[in-house]
Structures are given as C-alpha cells and as structure tokens.
Image: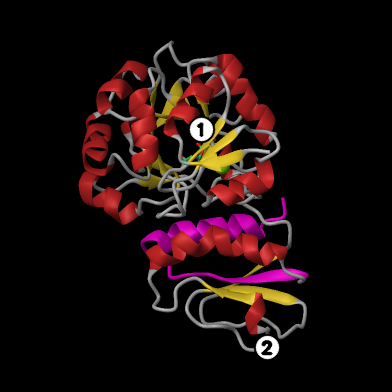
Amino acid sequence: MAQIGTDQQRAKALLEAGNVVGIPTETVYGLAANALDPDAVVTIFRVKNRPAFDPLIVHTDSLDKVTRFVTDLPEAAQQLAATFWPGPLTLLLPRQPIIPDLVTSGLPTVAVRIPNHPLTRALLRSLDFPLAAPSANPFGYISPTTAQHVANQLGDQIPYILDGGPALVGLESTIVGFEGGMPTIYRLGGLAQEAIEQVIGPVALRSHSTSNPKAPGMLSSHYAPRKPVYLVQPGASPPPTPRSGALVFRELFGGIAGGNQRTLSPTGNLNEAAKNLFAYLRELDQLEIDQIYAELLPPEGLGRAINDRLRRAAATA
Ligand code: TXA
Ligand code: MG
C-alpha cells in the first residue's frame, strides 16, 4: 500500500530509481515518472490502465527547461507562459527528439506545463529530468484532488504519494495548441478561456469534438463516475425520486434527500465550485443511490470547464 507523506527527498529518490510517485499540483494530483525514461513512463500507462495512444503532459519548473524540450515557442505561447506559468495551463509545442515517442504517443508536439504547487515545484527543481504525469486516476474515472483519492484507487500499485493538501483549482489544466498558427483550446480547464483571450485575443475551441483523436481526454465518456449522471439545465429541477443524488450549484433540489446532495458553491462562486467538483462527484458515487442529477452552471469563467466535465460524466459512450 502506498505511503502518504510530505517527504520530498523520498519522492525524489523513488523517481530517480525509475518508480512512479503521486504528486500534488494546483489542478489535480498527478501520477509522475521520469519523462525521459521510457521504462518509467511505461509504468504510468500500466498503473492507470491507459491506452498508449493517449499522450502525457511533461511537467517542469522553468521556461528555460521548457526550451530544451521544444523546438519552437510561438509569440502567443511566450505571452501565455509569461502570464500564466506556473499555473493551470498546458501548451502543445513542437517537440525535441529528447522527448520519448511514448510520452507524445508519436505526435510531433509535446504537452508541457509548469505547475503551481510549492512541494512539486521544489521537487521538480531538485530533479535533473522533467516529470511525465497524467491525472492519478484509473483511465476514464474522475481525477483526484487529494492524496487520499489517489491512495483509494491506485494505492496498491505505487510506493508513495506526496501529500500537498487538497488541490486549490480542482480542474485539470487548460490545454492550448497553435496548429496552423491559430491558438486553439483543446481542453477547457482550470484557466478560463476569458483570461487567455485577454492576453492573446480570440482563440478557437476544439474540445467538444469527439471524433478528433488529437487529445483523447476529449473522449466524450471521460471523467466519469460509475453511477449514471443526468444533466439538469440551470433553473430546472429533476423528478423527485427516492434513490437519487444530486450535484447542485447554489441551492438544493426539492424532492431529493439533502444528505444525497452536494452544493458546489452556496455563494455562486465558480472557482469554489471547480475546487469542490471532483471530490463531491466521488462522494456521490459512494452513496446508496442509483443515479446522480447534475445541475449545469452558468457558461462563463470556470463554469464552462465544469459543464464540459459534467457533460462527459453524463455521456455513456
Ligand atoms: O492539470 C493537468 O493537466 C493534470 C496535472 C497532473 O498536471 N494532468 C492531466 O493529465 O490532466 P492527463 O494525462 O489526465 O490529461 C492530459 C491530456 C490528455 O487528454 C492528452 O490526450 C492530452 O493532454 N495531450 C497530451 N499530449 C498531447 C499532445 N501532444 N497533443 C494533444 N493532446 C495531448
Ligand atoms: Mg486525466
């Protein structure tokens, strides 16, 4: 069983020996290994039960190091990096050959991110290699926002989880690429589209495509609890049923037991809602209920990324 602790030296030694380790970030917990060591990276895919066609994000701690992994940093990428790193933003950039094929699933681009968590930044600074890290959940399930979430599902397969407390953003990073010179969001996430557009102007959005294999995180049925999820439009309410649960934005639904409901943000704060989203979905998934009704949020700020995750959770294929 994985140990949970705050021993950065232990995490470092395990990673240097080719092991995988659970690490905290501000978005969600990651399952990390030496990104430059294909044997270590293979372990990530095995532990997560993740198909090899789904590429990984490379995490590092400085822009200087990023330039060793990519061949080009377009102007818009430089502006975004300068404004939002460290932070919940991943950039797709043309890769250097030092990045193994396994990490990018053979794609010509590599996904890179400088995460904003003090423990993980210190760990990354202390290592002489970057860390490949997907979210630390079994493939297709909800991402973990605490060390205990990681232990609950992957604890018997990994030696150590670095505990950095609950993730402060709570949604995976926003993924931005620059194919054909057009800044494009491939996954809505913890950095709002509006914030990105304030810096570089209008961006395209491709994250709703389900046929495009560019980012398999786009698979429609993803980030999903085991129980069926049904969406409820803002202001509407679900049918009253005894064995239902609900994830609501500000106020409980009538007709469903209060103990079977979770409120994302009583004050209507979308950042607070994002921070609570995955933990509450996990809690609801554990209850003695047959289905979860999830209320859609206002489509602005992080509300758009939250709605994206709820739609994927509700998709059955
Ligand atoms: O916040 C996050 O991004 C977290 C933390 C741990 O950093 N990581 C994360 O990783 O969410 P993961 O593997 O669960 O999601 C990464 C997504 C996948 O959908 C993958 O398909 C996409 O990034 N991706 C990675 N490399 C890519 C590439 N070269 N081109 C297109 N999509 C890529
Ligand atoms: Mg994931």
**Mark 2: few, some, or many residues within 10 Å (few <14, many ≥20)?**
few
- Mark 1 residue's CB less than 8 Å from ligand 1: yes
Q: Residue at x 65, y 79 (%)?
A: 259
Instruction: Say which residue appears at 49% left-offset and 63% top-offset.
Output: 276
The label nearer to you, 1 versus 2, is: 1
| Residue occupying the point 41% across, 54% down | 169
Instruction: Read off the residue under disc 1.
Output: 133
Q: Quadrant of ligand 2?
A: top right
Residue 179 appears in the picture as rendered: no
On the image, which quarter does residue 72 sit in?
Answer: top left
Q: Position of residue 146 (x, y in %)?
A: 53, 51
Give the CA separation, mark 1 to mark 2: 42 Å
Q: Which residue is mark 2?
A: 255
Left or right side of 26 for 76 = left
Seen from the viewer's position, the closer of residues 179 and 271 is: 271
Q: Secondary structure at mark 2?
A: loop
The kind of secondary structure element at disc 1 is: loop
Instruction: State the residue lying farthest toward the bottom.
Output: 254
Relative to 221, residue 133 above or below: above
The amino acid marked with disc number 2 is Gly
The magenta stretch is: 290-317
